[in-house]
Image (cartoon, helix red, strand yellow):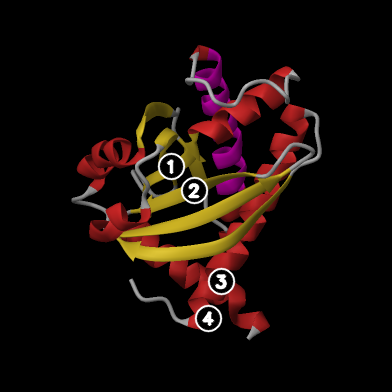
């Protein structure tokens, strides 16, 4: 998918509005001010996804997009191991604890909770902006090398999904910044609706 500058601006606007909602929800959960930005948005062919994914150990929280468009595709939160551990430590009030450890059950629970909050807020903001109902399914968690975790996701959606929207995010708080990405894998119908609605949304600004 080749985006023109207008579409890139529209997606960046969508990403930042979604990120702002997600940051508010995370701030309430962590009881600490958090800012979340989307400095970069990319739209790629699903066949090229492997080029944009590292080999590091990652917590991947996967949701199916539900709502007005049945089986609208998937949305995935991907967080490197260090990000998951840092956010868990922040939740537990042990910010200075060891970051160089293996992911444990507490981290897995935290990853699901954080992913759930981020995606619920992100889809809420997207749905409100575009005037459609978008809801996340219950989350599924994978802890693995990012390539391996994504292979199983792609295997499920390859027949329905052609394009992937990548929202690279940066979260800043009292602790050091942490990074993650939100991958939206909309089916063909949802992709068409998204861009049509984004164009309408941006018309008053053009």
Marks 4 and 3, Cα distance to the nearest angstrom?
6 Å
Which sits earlier in the primary sequence, circle 1 or circle 4?
Answer: 4
| Residue located beneath label 2 in the image | 182
Between disc 4 and disc 2, the foreground one is 2
Q: Does the stretch in magenta take in 121?
A: yes
Q: Residues within 10 Å of mark 3 (few under 14, many from 20)?
A: some
Q: Which residue is mark 3?
A: 10
Report the span colored magenta: 106-124
Circle on res. 6: 4
Identify the secondary structure beneath mark 3.
helix
Labels 1 and 2 touching (C-beta < 8 A)? yes
Q: Going 21% across and 49% down the picture, which residue do you hit?
A: 158
Residue corresponding to mark 1: 76
Q: Is residue 128 visible?
A: no
Q: Is residue 66 magenta?
A: no
Determine the residue positioned at 43% across, 34% down.
Answer: 58
- The foreground one among 83 and 119 is 83
Can I make out residue 200 in this image? yes
What residue do we see at 68% from left, 20% from top? 97
The Cα–Cα distance between marks 4 and 2, rounded to whole angstroms, is 21 Å
Q: Which numbered disc, 3 or 2, marks the residue that appears first in the sequence?
A: 3
């Amino acid at each position: 998918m080749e985006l023109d500058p207008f579409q890139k601006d529209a997606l960046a606007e969508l990403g930042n509005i979604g990120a702002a909602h997600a940051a508010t929800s995370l701030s309430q959960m962590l009881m600490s001010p958090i800012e979340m930005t989307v400095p970069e948005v990319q739209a790629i062919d699903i066949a090229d996804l492997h080029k944009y994914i590292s080999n590091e150990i990652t917590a991947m929280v996967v949701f199916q997009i539900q709502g007005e468009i049945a089986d609208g595709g998937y949305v995935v939160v991907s967080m490197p191991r260090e990000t998951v551990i840092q956010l868990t430590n922040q939740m537990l009030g042990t910010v200075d604890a060891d970051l160089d450890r293996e992911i444990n059950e507490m981290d897995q629970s935290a990853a699901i909770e954080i992913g759930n909050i981020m995606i619920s807020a992100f889809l809420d903001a997207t749905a409100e902006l575009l005037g459609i109902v978008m809801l996340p399914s219950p989350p599924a968690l994978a802890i693995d090398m990012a390539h391996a975790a994504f292979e199983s996701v792609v295997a499920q959606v390859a027949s329905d999904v052609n394009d992937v929207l990548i929202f690279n995010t940066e979260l800043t708080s009292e602790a050091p910044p942490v990074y993650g990405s939100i991958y939206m894998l909309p089916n063909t119908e949802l992709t068409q609706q998204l861009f049509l609605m984004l164009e309408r949304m941006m018309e008053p600004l053009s």
